[in-house]
Image (cartoon, rainbow, N blue to C red):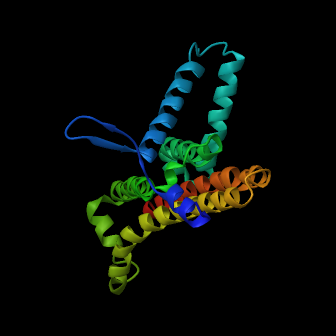
């Protein structure tokens, strides 16, 4: 099989399995890997938080609390003080995106190379952003904001509701897919040695950077919506 054919095969989003009910429910690889990540995090949460106490916390509890505090510090620095209530969401988003982008190290295909996954995340974020704006200004104030700084730019401001999630979606999807394609080409040309070295950048560094960028932009949009 030539490189092009192999690459096309690798880029396809295939079914992991089919649930034999209602005529067959197709579960894609992206959904299945996402379930695995969720299951691992749920299991880790149960194991790591077992036996936590308010008084006299043990070393394990102190380490977990320090890690959570550090992770929460990332979105906390992005958001204005009045928007710190969104820190748990952005922290969870950061952890999830980091895990999905790094999952390729373990031989899985990153769910974020699936446009459906990045689109769903972007839609969730834009709904939260607009809801924050409505809560801050009220529904009338939220509508009036589309006419700022002058009524003539109203169509452009309305269009931003589509542009923002599209930007979040395509930026994450494009970068993750691009890194995935590059790694597959390298593996086809030189399967030993070089892929391990470059994986440190494309799978680890770039994956974490893209997770941060998505959270960073979401935080900025929340701040903008609540000004």
Q: Nearer the viewer, residue 212 or 54?
A: 212
* Picture coordinates of residue 116, whole percent (x, y): 40, 56
Direction from residue 161 to residue 192 in the image, left or right: right
Residue occupying image coordinates x 41% and y 80%: 149
Q: Is residue 40 above or below residue 148?
A: above
- State the quadrant of the N terminus: bottom right
Kindly give the residue lying farthest to the front in the view shown: 1
Direction from residue 151 to residue 213 in the image, left or right: right
Q: Is residue 30 above or below residue 36?
A: below
Residue occupying image coordinates x 32% and y 44%: 26
Q: Nearer the viewer, residue 137 or 44?
A: 44
Q: Nearer the viewer, residue 129 or 10?
A: 10
Residue occupying image coordinates x 42% and y 50%: 14
Direction from residue 122 to residue 8 in the image, left or right: right
Q: Quadrant of residue 72?
A: top right
Q: Quadrant of residue 198?
A: bottom right
Direction from residue 11 to residue 26 in the image, left or right: left
Kindly give the residue lying farthest to the bottom in the view shown: 152
* Picture coordinates of residue 89, whole percent (x, y): 48, 44
* Picture coordinates of residue 47, whole percent (x, y): 57, 19
Kindly give the residue lying farthest to the left in the view shown: 22
Q: Quadrant of residue 134?
A: bottom left
* Picture coordinates of residue 183, whole percent (x, y): 66, 57
Q: Is residue 153 above or below residue 214?
A: below
Residue occupying image coordinates x 48% and y 68%: 167
Looking at the image, how many numbered discs can be counted on the residues?
0
């Amino acid at each position: 099989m030539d490189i092009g054919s192999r690459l096309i095969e690798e880029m396809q989003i295939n079914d992991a399995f089919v649930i034999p009910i209602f005529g067959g429910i197709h579960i894609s690889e992206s959904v299945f890997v996402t379930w695995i990540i969720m299951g691992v995090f749920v299991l880790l949460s149960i194991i790591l938080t077992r036996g936590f106490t308010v008084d006299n916390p043990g070393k394990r509890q102190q380490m977990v609390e320090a890690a959570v505090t550090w992770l929460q510090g990332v979105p906390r620095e992005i958001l204005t003080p009045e928007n710190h209530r969104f820190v748990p969401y952005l922290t969870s988003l950061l952890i999830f995106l980091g895990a999905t982008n790094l999952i390729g190290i373990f031989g899985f295909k990153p769910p974020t190379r699936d446009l459906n996954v990045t689109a769903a995340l972007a839609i969730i974020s834009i709904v939260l952003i607009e809801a924050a704006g409505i809560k801050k200004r009220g529904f009338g104030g939220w509508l009036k904001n589309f006419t700022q700084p002058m009524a003539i730019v109203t169509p452009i401001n309305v269009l931003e509701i589509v542009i923002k999630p599209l930007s979040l979606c395509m930026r994450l999807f494009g970068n993750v897919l691009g890194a995935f394609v590059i790694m597959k080409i390298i593996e086809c040309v030189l399967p030993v040695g070089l892929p391990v070295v470059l994986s440190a950048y494309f799978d680890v560094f770039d994956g974490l950077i893209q997770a941060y960028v998505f959270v960073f932009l979401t935080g900025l949009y929340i701040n903008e919506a609540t000004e």
